[in-house]
Amino acid sequence: MEKITINSVAKHAGVSKKTVSRVLNNEANVSDATREKVLAAFKELDYKPNPIARGLANNRSFIIGCLYDNPSKSYITRVQTGALAACQEQQYNLLIHPCELRGQALLDNIDTLLHTSQLDGIVLTPPFSDQKPLVDFLKAKKIPYSRVASVLLEDDSISIGSNDGYAAYEITKLLISLGHTEIAFIKGHPDHSATEQRLLGYKQALEESGLPFKESLIDEGNFSYHSGEDSARRILNLTPRPSAVFASNDYMAAAVLKVASQLKLSVPHDLSIAGFDNAPIARHIWPGLTTIAQPVEQMTHIAVTKLIEQIKNPELENYQENLPARLITRESTGPYRSS
């Protein structure tokens, strides 16, 4: 049986070998009619590209790495969904690389990864997208990268984010509009730039409403359920007890709900609770959590797509975009009621 090659496809479609290669690499400079003709030839000939040969011909591995370290499984699932969809559209493969290292150990780990996997580029998710030494390391190595992050870094190439500060401001303003004046805030992990952005949004809402910022109402978690539980035990035993708690993610907010139940507090009658991220847990517990929905899949999809476009054409301009978050009001928040 005759082996089907790129030359066979070109002859069958009546186009050049270069045109077939452009379609394979999903390049833009091919007309829709020609692209359809080549894709039809792929199907009719049952052509399966050889990834090794394709990589050698283009001096690429056609693999994008995704670096992550996040205690929220649902967040990583959404990151992977967006990244995989973008890679499939661009005929790339995705290598998921979980990592808990920091400092020089992290840089050594990434250096080994780049050598062993021969990645064409890497997408950084929080908290790695917030670490300038890692970004500088990739720049020095001339490794294309993109960031899913809440703040821009100087000379960023590709950065896709969502306005964490404004979203936190919006949810704090909601609690204030319900009559709450003693609103506790549970911060996230200090490695994440989103942690500071969300705190700033909370502070801004208080200031605009003429409410004082109180350090006693602030506690630090690390985005995990257990840290939320520890923070809730301290906050809910304050005198006077706050009438509302805003946690920096839904897992910590769910932990606040658990501690409130243990203390026989009715939510939202005795205590309003809000979270962030719109994780599945926010919808599955009762009462459902008021929260902020970020377009994580879309953010990662754009970050990977723009990264691959820049790999194909290094002359492309840098790209930054902030996607809007959405406030979702559920049953965990209600009007302030004096005890």
Image (spheres, rainbow, N blue to C red):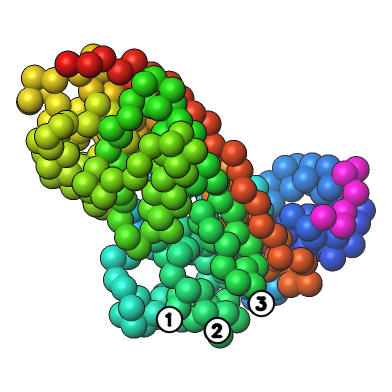
Q: Earlier in the sequence, mark 3 or mark 2?
A: 3
Give the alpha-carbon distance from disc 1 to disc 3, as whole Å: 19 Å
Camera sees residue 48: no
**In front: mark 1 or mark 3?**
1
> Residue 243 appears in which quarter of the rendering?
top left
Name the mark on residue 111: 1
Q: What element does badge 3 sit on?
A: loop
Is-magenta flag for residue 336? Answer: no
**Span highlighted in magenta in the image:** 28-34
Mark 2 element type: loop
Q: Above or below — where is 199 with respect to 239?
A: below
Q: Which residue is mark 3?
A: 59
Callout 3 crowding tier (Cα within 10 Å): few <14, some 14–19, many ≥20: few
Q: Say left or right for 50 vs 105.
A: right
Residue beneath label 2, please? 141
Identified at 49% across, 38% down, the residue is: 208
- Residue type (three-letter) at the residue carrying disc 3: Asn
* Residue 319 spot, x, y in % from top left: 70, 60
Q: Residues within 10 Å of mark 1 (few under 14, many from 20)?
A: some
Q: Amino acid at mark 2?
A: Lys
User: Toward which corner of the image does residue 190 lie, by quadrant?
Assistant: bottom left
Which mark is first along the chain, 3 or 1?
A: 3
